[in-house]
Image (cartoon, rainbow, N blue to C red):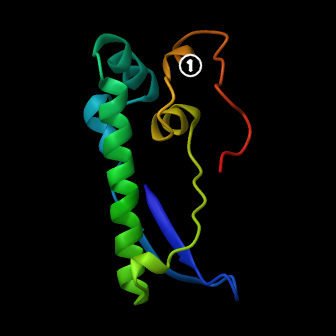
Amino acid sequence: MAAHMCDMTTGDVVSSASVMNPQIRFGEDLMSRVSYVMMNEGGDKDMCRVVREALSELAAQAAKKAGVPVEDLLEITIVCNPIMHHLLLGIDPTPLGSAPFALATDWAVS
């Protein structure tokens, strides 16, 4: 996972931070993570928690490197694969584990 903090007045990247995706402990690939959710009650909540914690840590690291209080961050944009998207937002990813791979939403979420 990577974060890039930008100055919104200039568009310049002012700092960057990265961490290994903590969801790897639940499975090496996307389908094994969906299988983990299917076979472990509360697995989706565990994966949601660890990815949100990682995002929080990335924001703190990027803010510190830029010399900005993390409380001053106003907006983030997150780009990820559909399974991480669902897990991050607390949406059940199991429908993505079999065809026809139905997304809960394919719109931007605010």
Q: Residues within 10 Å of mark 1 (few under 14, many from 20)?
A: some
The residue most toward the right is 107
Residue holding disc 1: 96
Q: Position of residue 66 (x, y in %)?
A: 43, 86
Q: Work out whether residue 64 or residue 42 is closer to the camera in this orientation and state it.
A: 42
Amino acid type shown at disc 1: Leu
Q: Is residue 60 above or below residue 32?
A: below
Q: Left or right: 84 with respect to 45?
A: right
Locate residue 109: give its quadrant: top right
Q: Is residue 74 left or right of residue 36?
A: right
Q: Residue at x 64, y 25 (%)?
A: 104
**76 vs 48: above or below:** below
Question: Quick one: quadrant of the N terminus?
Answer: bottom left
- Residue at 52 percent of width and 31 percent of height: 83
> In the figure, 30 relative to 110: above or below?
above
Residue 86 image offset from top left, x and y in percent: 53, 33
Residue depicted at x 33% and y 63%: 57
Could you tell me residue 63's position as x and y percent? Answer: 41, 79
Front one among 53 and 35: 53
Quadrant in the rendering for residue 71? bottom left
Q: Would you place residue 86 above or below residue 16 in this image?
A: above
Q: Secondary structure at mark 1?
A: helix
